[in-house]
Amino acid sequence: MALALSAGWPLLAAMLGWSMSLFRIRGIQLQLHFTFFVLLAVVAQDGWAEAQWPGLLWSLATILAFFTCVVLHELGHSFTAMYFGIGVRRILLMPIGGMAEFADIPRQPLREFLITIAGPAVNFAIVALLWFSPFGDDVDSVEKHSWAGLVEQVFAANLVMGCFNLLPAFPMDGGRIFRAVLATRLSYVRATAWAATIGKVVCGVAIFFALQAPRFQLHDEPLYMLAVLFSFIFIAGEIEFRAVKRRERDDAHWREILARLHPASSRPAVEPPVITL
């Protein structure tokens, strides 16, 4: 997912800054949002209530394995972007997932497509590898608090993660791919406008079904975390769209000024920070 932070969204920018640095991977700073520790505490408590120490340790191992896959997903985006000469400032892990902050997002549709598809491709590659892992042919026979059970959970999580990110909810991966396809026929701004609009509709429908999950027999209780996630995606899509429009307006303004002063010269556009999920 991608969004451009600006002075117009100081609260969101500040919230994303509440993080601690862990280590670097090929120059990319890996950071952990402080709310991640709340998630660990909740997971540990649930594991303890279910099976005390075995449940606690297995639950923590599962969530850490899951977020390791999240990091690999973001590295798929990041390494592909770096191949095209785009800087990657950091990868931020939060309870709702991960975000890679890029210095730029290319306006060439093919490059954007390749950078975007690289994330889900990593998840599907993990699924393919785990498919041949010895966690049992019969899923019902796999014990939950076991190595086989952990592998089964990671397998399912990567399958869901890969498919979920392909939803056309801009600026998630699926929405960004949709924008890249539209940009082959439309202007970049119009392509972004269409992708953002479709993304908002998808998010609105998802929030509705998440909150009404018991009514539609999707879950025993409302899926509040899923609703929060799609609310965040909704806001991120609006941020991205406004950033694209603002850049287009600024570029047009500078082109007009420079055309008056130096008709043969051009001024490179300055990109705002871009964040991808």
Image: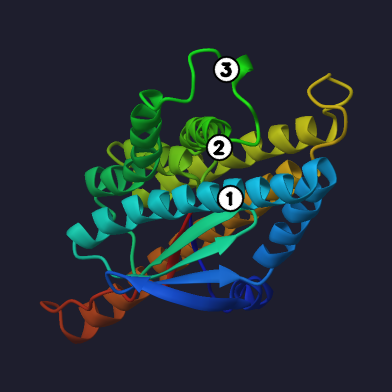
Q: Does dot 2 land on a helix, a strand or a loop?
A: helix
Residue 233, given in percent of the width and then of the height, sits at 61, 50
Q: Position of residue 255 (x, y in %)?
A: 27, 74
Kindly identify the residue that appears in the image at 71 percent across and 38 percent down.
Answer: 204
250 or 133: which is nearer to us?
A: 133
Of callouts 2 and 3, the N-terminal one: 3
Which residue is the site of mark 1? 61
Residue type beneath disc 2 = Leu
Residue located at (48% from left, 25% from top):
135
The residue depicted at 21 percent of the width and 86 percent of the height is: 261
Cα distance in 3D space between marks 2 and 1: 8 Å
Residue 46, image x and y in percent? Answer: 80, 47
Asked whether residue 92 appears in the rendered view, the answer is yes
Q: Quadrant of residue 264?
A: bottom left
Q: Circles 2 and 1: CB distance less than 8 Å?
A: yes
Q: Amino acid at mark 1?
A: Ala
Q: For the residue carrying disc 3, how many other residues have a C-alpha within 10 Å: few (<14), some (14-19), or many (20+)? A: few
Query: Which residue lies under the disc numbered 2?
Result: 150
Q: Relative to 191, is 76 on the left or the right?
A: left
Element at label 1:
helix
> Alpha-carbon distance for marks 1 and 3?
20 Å
- Earlier in the chain: of badge 2 and badge 1, it is 1
The tag on residue 139 is 3
Is 18 above or below relative to 190? below
Image coordinates of residue 73 in percent, x first then y, are: 41, 48
Q: Which mark is residue 159?
A: none
Dot 1: within a 10 Å radius of its alpha carbon, few (fewer than 14), some, or many (20 or more) residues? few
Q: In front: 103, or 154? A: 154
Element type where label 3 sits in the image:
helix
Q: Is residue 1 visible?
A: no
Question: Viewer-proximal residue, 201 or 140?
Answer: 140
